Image (spheres, grey):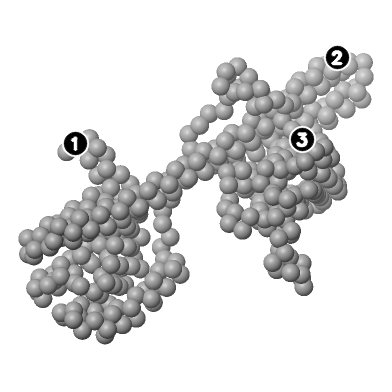
Amino acid sequence: MTSPLRSLWSAPAAVPPPPRRVWRDWALVGVLVPLVVVEAALRPEVPWRWAWGVALLALVPTLLWRRTRPFTMLAIAFGAGTAFGLATGDDPQLFTTAYFLVLVYAVMRWGSGRAMLGGGALVLGGWALSLATGAPSIADLIGSAAVVVTTWSLGLAFRWRAGARARELDRMRLLEREQLARDLHDTVAHHVSAIAIQAQAGLAVADRDPDAAAHVLRTIELEASRTLDEMRSMVRVLRRDGGPGRTGDAGDPGVDAAERSPAPSAGDVRRLAASATGPGDLDVEVTVAGDLEALPPAVGAAVFRLAQEAVTNARRHAPGANRVDVDVTVDGSGVQLEVRDDGRPVASARPGYGITGMIERASLLGGTCTAGPVAPAPGGDADDATNGWRVSAVLPREAWTETTT
């Protein structure tokens, strides 16, 4: 077996894995059943039309398992169809037989390498058997081959596209994990430096000023507690299944200046406020309620990164937007962040890599992040295109102090 065939034979099933069954599957079955009956009734010139109709109806349920068992369903459908054709001495002439192509597509879209090779061999074997038992015209041969090859190509193209997107999303998640871990590293280094300085000061005054030394010890205790919290957060991040990767440091030429810059804090959210200076610019209003400075450094950095990404998305992807409102609330339950623009939401918007990164960053700290068009106000016009887009994140306080073992 050549190397390409060996690689294809060992290829796993499609990534991401398919849904087991969705409403479209039931709709497809519900449409095909009456179509088979109607065609069998309206085409009296087709030999064995009712027998073929019953056979096709019996095979329609294979569509419900075409994603989870693509090769098995294709083998059942093609095997039964071929056997019935040999028994009747004629090929199926009902147009609804074309739903077998959905099974051919499913093998290439969802199956493993063995399933793809087996499905291809099955289709080619059926094609060769039709040549041996009949005398199809050249036009029929070329047409059937073109349809099958097109179906295969579509299945492989959509498989590659979904796999590429899944790999890109995994890469973005890994980058977010690395960025958060880098921020945590910077904050821990800050606390350790403070502990070292306070310890030196305590040694200097311990003999002549015991009260000052006690104050230094309390400061060291506070800094050590903060450091422990940050280290636990870092361990929680790095123990998540993020795949292989590495984070650079200041001596790594692969890390740019932005990555070596000090970690941002929640207070930096106020720097996002800006006034429009020309066409296409946005007014960014920042409203803060609560004490941002009391947030742990990792949480503060996450709040800033979330707000920064949301404002950037509004500048890039909000058609007709003039204003962005950033609201940050810090209370006993945690932090609530909402970023809203007044642009026209895109009807076909799908989560991009920026949104995926925000969701990942919030989840790493035990929170949630959602993004989508703003629903119209009660009693408002549902077709109003100026409701805007909103990003909402919640970082609960209990998740910050969660200990891990």
The residue under label 3 is 265
Residue 1: image x %, image y %?
17, 38
Among the 4 quarters of the image, the one containing residue 3: top left
Residue under label 1 = 2
> Which is more toward the observer, 133 or 206?
133
Element type at marker 1?
Answer: loop
The residue wearing badge 2 is 204
| Element marked by disc 3 | loop
Residue 261, compared with residue 46, is above or below; it is above
Q: Which of 79 and 135 is in front in this view?
A: 135
Between tags 2 and 3, which lies in front?
3
Q: Nearer the viewer, residue 257 or 335?
A: 257
Q: In the image, residue 126 lies at what x, y percent?
A: 15, 60
Mark 1 residue type: Thr
Mark 1 or mark 2, which has the lower sequence index?
1
Residue 284's quadrant in the figure?
Answer: top right
Identify which residue is drawn at 47% across, 45% down.
Answer: 166
